[in-house]
Image (cartoon, rainbow, N blue to C red):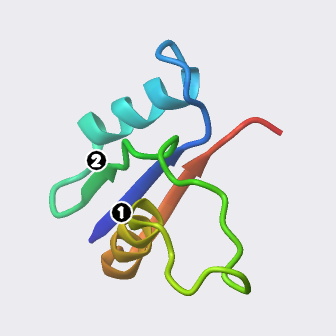
Amino acid sequence: MRVLALSGSLRAASIHSALLRAAVRLAPAGMELRPWSGIGDPTLFNPDHEPHEPERVAALHAEVAVADALLALQSA
C-alpha cells in the first residue's frame, strides 16, 4: 500500500511533520508511507482563468493519483 503523507505546517520544528516522520519509521511491512516535501511550493491558481496548472500543482496531482491513501495532518 502506498500512502502519501502531507503535513499542513511549513515550520521546521512542526509537530505534525515530526509525527509523519515517526509514521514513516513505524509503518508496517508492505506499506510505503511517503511524505510530500513540496507542500509549501504550489501557488494559488484559478483553473477558470489559467489554461494550465502550475508545475508543482501538477506534481502533487500526480503523487495523489498513484497513492492508495492520503494521510494529512494540520491544525484545526
Tag 1: Cα neighbours inside 10 Å, few (<14), some, or many (≥20)? many
Q: Residue at x 48, y 30 (%)?
A: 17
Q: Residue at x 73, y 86 (%)?
A: 48
Q: Residue at x 25, y 35 (%)?
A: 25
Percent position of residue 64, x then y: 42, 73
Residue, far top: 13
Location of residue 47 with respect to 11 vertically, above or below: below
Q: Is residue 67 left or right of residue 76?
A: left
Choose between 58 and 6: the one closer to the eye: 58
Q: Is residue 15 left or right of residue 17?
A: right
Location of residue 51 with respect to 35 vertically, above or below: below
Can you tell which mark lies on residue 27? Answer: 2
Percent position of residue 61, x then y: 44, 74
Amino acid type, callout 2 = Ala
Choose between 76 and 58: the one closer to the eye: 58
Location of residue 55 with respect to 42 vertically, above or below: below
* Location of mark 1 (residue): 3
Q: Quadrant of residue 16?
A: top right
The reply to whether callout 2 and callout 1 are in contact (CB within 8 Å) is yes
Tag 2 secondary structure: loop
For marks 2 and 1, the one nearer the N-term is: 1
Tag 1 secondary structure: strand
Distance between mark 2 and mark 1 Cα atoms: 10 Å
